[in-house]
């Protein structure tokens, strides 16, 4: 049997005949179509739940449209602020908003969310082995020797440092420094990747900005090979992560993902001045964070200080 979809003309005729009080079987007889087709169309057209969502939560949905910004205000933040501002207006949970987005019931696309879905990598990494380290001076150490109290994240000054690259075959990059406790970020424009240049750049920036430093954690990037010199001058320990273990710098990796909201991957950094990075830093450091009960990193830093 051949099936055809209802066109707009047929739908209009069904609506008119149903509005006159005719039964679904009578409408089907007049239009020479199956009464089950009328039933399905009526269920889709006049579904009570869909009308309930559209009308009851009009204020809430309009607030999402007006205030949601994938770079600065996530769905969680918008829901929290709405419930705080409109105490008696109907609202839903964060999970329900994501269900609406996945079902296409509101005009926010999955591609516009803060965090894009990623495919799970089923391949398991092999055994992780430490490199041989020169421990004579005891300034540069493997992350396995990092004290356990640093993992508690209850003390300002334990930093994670990483680099954000731009366009391929381009020397310009961004050095991101993140405090493990407050998640406050500092961004530095780097024009070269030479290890001694990066070391000097980071040291001078930390001294200039008067950033509190108690330890530094980095990855195995070649640009950080000389950073032990800066750590020694600052009088702190520098801990190197294991190869291919980015989860050991989780705060840094997550912050880099937030920076990517402003500077997408593959975009050139050559024409991005330091003042532009300062503006991004301000937006991120004043952004409400769910992990801090919707307080910003700057507010958390002021509490500890």
Image: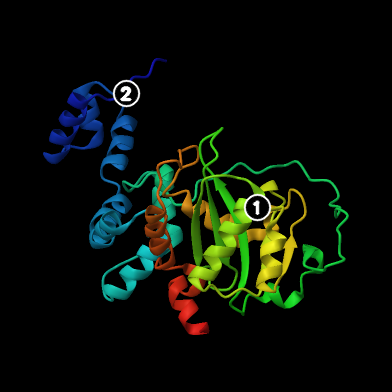
Q: Quadrant of residue 53?
A: bottom left
What is the quadrant of the N terminus in the image? top left
Of 24 and 209, the residue lying toward us: 209
**Residue in the image at 37% along x and 58% along y:** 279
For label 1, the SS is: helix
Side of 257 where 80 appears, left or right = left
For label 2, the SS is: loop
Of 233 and 28, the residue lying toward us: 233
Q: Quadrant of residue 238?
A: bottom right
Side of 45 where 144 appears, left or right = right
**Residue in the image at 24% along x and 24% along y:** 7
Q: Where residue 286 sits: x, y (%)?
A: 39, 68
Side of 249 where 4 appears, left or right = left
Q: Where residue 174 sits: x, y (%)?
A: 52, 50
Residue under pointer 1? 196
Of 248 and 233, the residue lying toward us: 233
Of 214 and 244, the residue lying toward us: 214
Residues under labels 1 and 2: Cα distance? 68 Å
Using the rendered image of the protein, determine whether residue 99 is visible from the camera's viewpoint: yes
Q: Earlier in the sequence, mark 1 or mark 2?
A: 2
Q: Quadrant of residue 41?
A: top left
Residue under pointer 2? 5
**Does 26 sit above or below residue 52?**
above
Task: Look at discs 1 and 2 and give the one toward the viewer.
Answer: 1
**Residue in the image at 32% along x and 30% along y:** 37
**Residue in the image at 25% along x and 61% along y:** 56
Using the rendered image of the protein, determine whether residue 92 is visible from the camera's viewpoint: no
Total labels: the figure holds: 2
The crowding category of the residue bearing disc 2, from other C-alpha atoms within 10 Å (few below 14, some 14 to 19, many at least 20), is few
- Dot 1 and dot 2 residues touching (CB under 8 Å): no
Query: Which residue reaches farthest top?
Result: 2
Q: Where residue 98 sits: x, y (%)?
A: 43, 53
């Amino acid at each position: 049997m051949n099936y055809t979809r209802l066109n707009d003309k047929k739908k209009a005729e069904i609506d008119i005949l149903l509005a006159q009080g005719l039964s679904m079987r009578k409408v089907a007889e007049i239009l020479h179509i199956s009464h089950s087709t009328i039933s399905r169309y009526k269920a889709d057209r006049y579904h009570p739940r869909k009308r309930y969502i559209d009308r009851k939560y009009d204020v809430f949905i309009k607030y999402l449209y007006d205030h949601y910004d994938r770079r600065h205000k996530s769905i969680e933040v918008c829901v929290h602020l709405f419930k705080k501002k409109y105490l008696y207006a109907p609202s839903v949970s964060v999970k329900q908003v994501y269900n609406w987005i996945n079902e296409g019931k509101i005009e926010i696309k999955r591609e516009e969310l803060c965090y894009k879905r990623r495919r799970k990598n089923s391949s398991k990494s092999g055994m992780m082995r430490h490199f041989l380290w020169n421990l004579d001076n005891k300034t540069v150490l493997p992350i396995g020797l990092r004290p356990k109290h640093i993992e508690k994240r209850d003390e300002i000054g334990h930093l994670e440092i990483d680099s954000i690259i731009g366009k391929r075959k381009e020397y310009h990059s961004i050095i991101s420094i993140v405090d493990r406790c407050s998640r406050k970020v500092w961004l530095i424009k780097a024009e070269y990747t030479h290890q001694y240049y990066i070391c000097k750049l980071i040291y001078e920036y930390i001294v200039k900005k008067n950033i509190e430093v108690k330890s530094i954690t980095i990855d195995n990037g070649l640009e950080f090979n000389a950073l032990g010199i800066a750590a020694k001058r600052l009088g702190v320990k520098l801990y190197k992560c294991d190869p291919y273990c980015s989860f050991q710098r989780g705060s840094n990796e997550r912050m880099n993902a937030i920076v990517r909201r402003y500077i997408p991957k593959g975009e050139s950094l050559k024409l991005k001045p330091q003042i532009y990075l300062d503006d991004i830093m301000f937006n991120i450091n004043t952004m409400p964070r769910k992990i801090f009960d919707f307080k910003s990193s700057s507010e958390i830093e002021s509490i500890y200080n």
